[in-house]
């Protein structure tokens, strides 16, 4: 074994940096190195500064996290748009929500591709959900137009039947049998 930290007998027993293995400490028994080793510990903080010494304050480092708001917002808006698109009375709200969510999702996806966000899949899910919301709004509008068209045709046919009945009753005059025949 090599000589200790200093001449034998002058250095007290204890743990010292191992001269044969950097990064480890080895036990010095006061006369010679032993076989006991351990990982070197980080040095203890320095002693208090001398009176009147200038001490610098530690620097605070702020780490900004990923900007995931657009992708998450797109998914939330798309899901709300889907719910509104499935409700007969509120289907029309799904269109603007779908458009807004779609573009937020695209912006969020671009952020993720640039490394500014870490939720590319969430942003893509927002784009898909928003597109579904918009499609539901279009389907809802088409159904309303179809129903109103059909109702208009039915009302027009009913109006024509009513006119025909009124004309028949007028033509029947006082003849009750002819009036009864108009209703058939």
Image (spheres, helix red, strand yellow):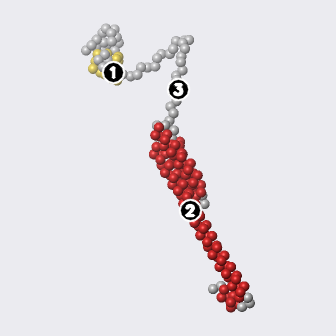
Which is more toward the observer, 101 or 46?
101
Can you identify the residue that label 3 sits on? Answer: 60
* Residue at image location 48% in from the left, 49% down from the top: 125
Q: Between marks 1 and 3, how big is the CA–CA gap?
A: 32 Å
**36 or 95, nearer to the observer:** 95
**Which label number is shown at residue 142?**
2
Residue 108 position within the rendered picture, expressed as x and y whole percent measured from the top left: 51, 43
Q: Is residue 142 left or right of residue 11?
A: right
- Could you classify mark 2 by the number of other residues whose Cα lies within 10 Å: few (under 14), some (14-19), or many (20 or more)? few
| Number of numbered discs visible in the structure rendering | 3
> Which of pointers 1 and 3 indicates the residue nearer the eye?
3
- Disc with the residue nearer the chain's start (3 vs 2): 3
Q: CA distance from mark 1 to mark 2?
A: 77 Å
Q: What secondary structure is found at the residue carrying circle 3? A: loop
The residue shown at (29%, 17%) is 20
To which residue does mark 1 refer? Answer: 24
At a point 60% along the width and 60% down the height, the residue shown is 89
């Amino acid at each position: 074994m090599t000589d200790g930290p200093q001449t034998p007998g002058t250095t007290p027993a204890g743990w010292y940096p191992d001269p044969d293995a950097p990064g480890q400490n080895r036990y010095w028994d006061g006369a010679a190195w032993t076989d006991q080793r351990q990982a070197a510990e980080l040095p203890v903080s320095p002693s208090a500064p001398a009176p009147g010494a200038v001490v610098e304050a530690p620097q605070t480092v702020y780490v900004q996290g990923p900007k995931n708001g657009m992708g998450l917002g797109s998914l939330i808006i798309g899901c709300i748009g889907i719910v509104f698109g499935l409700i007969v009375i509120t289907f029309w709200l799904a269109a603007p929500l779908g458009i807004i969510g779609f573009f937020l999702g695209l912006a969020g996806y671009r952020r993720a591709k640039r490394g500014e966000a870490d939720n590319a899949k969430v942003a893509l899910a927002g784009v898909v959900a928003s597109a579904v919301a918009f499609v539901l709004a279009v389907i809802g509008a088409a159904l309303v137009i179809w129903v109103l068209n059909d109702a208009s045709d039915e009302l027009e046919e009913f109006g024509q039947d009513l006119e025909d009945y009124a004309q028949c009753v007028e033509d029947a005059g006082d003849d009750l049998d002819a009036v009864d025949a108009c209703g058939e």
